[in-house]
């Protein structure tokens, strides 16, 4: 089984650059596919999740060139130009790929079948299927999970949908279906979630208006190809941000990171804990704000994390749990039940890992209570979850002995090259297959 072995070490001060944003890379491929003209994407994330979307788009009859050094060219076929895939669409480990494609494919004239790896086959899909059915889509799941079968030829109607869970994937799937619906589609969210779909739809010429927590979409006649420059992924930067707080020899700057406010809740959480963080060199990559993030090592203090920040840091909570383990005192995270339906049950898997390195904690139905303390070496099983694996990799910066992390191959889904970057940044890390 793939593993990391990390000896006690420090993160060296200096610059780190992270790969492109996963959420934005998926969306650029999908919108590029149904736009008119040639979409050029730079900084595309060449991780397995986005490559699964790329493969699916190709199976649907779209010509995609690349990726070459982060450059991808998508020759759009227009809103009605996709063809049915000859076989199953395999989304691998990628929940975003599957859920957004459900929205896109429910409006097509042909049938589709979507599957994924063992983790994805366990994840809930009715949260997307249900509103799509209300729009007129004909979708089947198996006990609420993949495989997902979508019957083509449905006529979709616009929907006003109040999402019961704060999910950008559900919101995006409904908006993508809304591109094809008769009448306006409105999606209201119970809390702010990442808004990359809304921003990118505007870049492709579709008028999406956000008002009082709801996105309003009028079906466009066409989408126009665009140039997309993908920012560095904040969720990948999160590991270095926490690593710099807990175990760096001096200031660390993570350059060119997307700082869309719907993604950066971790910065506020860490600031509450006493972190020394600064955003500088602000600029825009198209519709997305970008900055360099400067972090100085600082002693952290436990905090009660406001639930309103949780959806703004949903993918960063595993890294935050490591910050909490290295803080003085208690940190409490609640309102994070969504973690239970990610690539793994991240509350349970992180708790097992914390136990393995000697950190006292209590598992809550919707979060964790963590008592900071000395972290010992040992063996942690990531359960095949990329973010759990990377979180414990940075925890090794504070471990008193070697830390072994098991089942790390899925790091390649979101952060290819993580171990190389970690090694260059000072971690004494070795990876074995
Ligand atoms: C994502 C939305 C989030 C996030 C996932 C990416 C997206 O999922 O956890 O990694 O790109 O829309 P949910 O919509 O399930 O919260």
Image: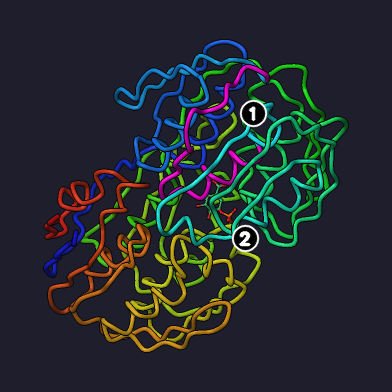
In the rendered structure, the answer to whether residue 172 lies left or right of residue 2 reads right
Q: Is residue 389 above or below residue 287?
A: below
Q: For the residues carrying marks 1 and 2, which lies nearer the camera in this image?
A: 1
Q: Is residue 340 above or below residue 260?
A: below
Identify the residue at horizontal 28%, vertical 71% (top origin): 381
Q: Earlier in the sequence, mark 1 or mark 2?
A: 1
The secondary structure type at the circle numbered 1 is loop
In the rendered structure, the answer to whether residue 363 lies left or right of residue 34 reads left
Q: Farthest residue to the right: give it.
A: 183
Q: Which mark is residue 144?
A: 2
Q: Is mark 1 within 8 Å of ligand 1?
A: no
Identify the residue at horizontal 35%, vertical 80% (top origin): 352
Q: Is residue 281 magenta?
A: no
In the rendered structure, the answer to whether residue 215 lies left or right of residue 330 reads right
Neighbour tally class for label 2: few under 14, some 14-19, many 20 plus, Cα within 10 Å = some
Marks 1 and 2, how far apart at CA: 22 Å
Q: Position of residue 387 (x, y in %)?
A: 37, 59
Neighbour tally class for label 1: few under 14, some 14-19, many 20 plus, Cα within 10 Å = some
Name the quadrant of the N terminus: bottom left
Identify the residue at horizontal 48%, vertical 81% (top origin): 331
Q: Is residue 98 magenta?
A: yes
The secondary structure type at the circle numbered 2 is loop
Name the quadrant of the C terminus: bottom left
Q: Is residue 68 above or below residue 274?
A: above
Q: Are marks 1 and 2 in contact (CB under 8 Å)?
A: no
Camera-side residue of 332 and 89? 89
Q: Position of residue 156 (x, y in %)?
A: 80, 35
Q: Position of residue 378 (x, y in %)?
A: 18, 79
Number of dots carrying numbers: 2
Identify the residue at horizontal 49%, vertical 62% (top origin): 122
Q: Which residue is identified by label 1?
A: 110
Which residues are drawn in magenta?
Answer: 80-103
């Amino acid at each position: 089984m793939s593993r990391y072995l990390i000896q006690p070490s420090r993160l060296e001060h200096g610059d780190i650059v992270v790969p492109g944003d996963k959420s934005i890379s998926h969306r650029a491929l999908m919108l590029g596919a149904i736009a008119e003209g040639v979409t050029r994407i730079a900084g595309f994330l060449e991780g397995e999740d986005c490559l699964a979307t790329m493969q699916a788009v190709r199976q649907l009859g779209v010509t995609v060139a690349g990726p070459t050094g982060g450059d991808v060219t998508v020759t759009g076929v227009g809103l009605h130009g996709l063809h049915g895939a000859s076989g199953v669409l395999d989304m691998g480990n990628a929940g975003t790929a599957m859920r957004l494609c459900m929205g896109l494919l429910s409006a097509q004239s042909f049938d589709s079948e979507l599957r994924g790896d063992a983790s994805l086959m366990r994840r809930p899909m009715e949260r997307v299927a249900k509103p799509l059915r209300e729009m007129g889509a004909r979708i089947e799941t198996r006990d609420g999970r993949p495989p997902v079968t979508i019957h083509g030829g449905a006529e979709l109607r616009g929907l006003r949908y109040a999402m019961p869970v704060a999910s950008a994937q559900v919101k995006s799937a409904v908006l993508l279906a809304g591109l094809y619906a008769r009448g306006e589609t409105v999606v209201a969210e119970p809390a702010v979630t990442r808004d990359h779909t809304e921003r990118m739809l505007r870049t492709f010429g579709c008028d999406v208006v956000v008002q009082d927590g709801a996105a309003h979409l009028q079906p466009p006649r066409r989408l126009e190809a665009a140039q997309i420059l993908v920012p560095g992924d904040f969720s990948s930067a999160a590991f270095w941000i926490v690593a710099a707080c807990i175990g760096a020899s001096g200031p660390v700057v993570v350059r060119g990171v997307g700082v869309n406010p719907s993604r950066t809740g971790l910065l506020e959480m860490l600031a509450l804990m006493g972190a020394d963080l600064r955003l500088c060199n602000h600029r825009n990559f198209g519709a997305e704000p970008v900055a360099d993030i400067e972090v100085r090592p600082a002693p952290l203090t436990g905090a009660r994390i406001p639930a309103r920040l949780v959806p703004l840091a949903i993918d960063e909570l595993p890294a935050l749990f490591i910050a909490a383990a290295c803080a003085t005192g208690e940190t409490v995270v609640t309102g994070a039940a969504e973690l239970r339906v990610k690539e793994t049950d991240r509350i349970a898997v992180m708790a097992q890992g914390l136990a393995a390195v000697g950190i006292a904690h209590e598992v809550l139905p919707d979060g964790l209570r963590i008592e900071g303390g000395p972290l010992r070496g040992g063996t942690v099983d990531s359960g095949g979850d990329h973010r759990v694996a990377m979180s414990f990799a940075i925890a090794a910066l504070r471990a008193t002995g070697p830390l072994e992390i098991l089942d790390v191959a899925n790091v390649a889904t979101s952060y290819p090259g993580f171990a190389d970057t970690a090694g260059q940044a000072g971690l004494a890390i070795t990876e074995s297959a």
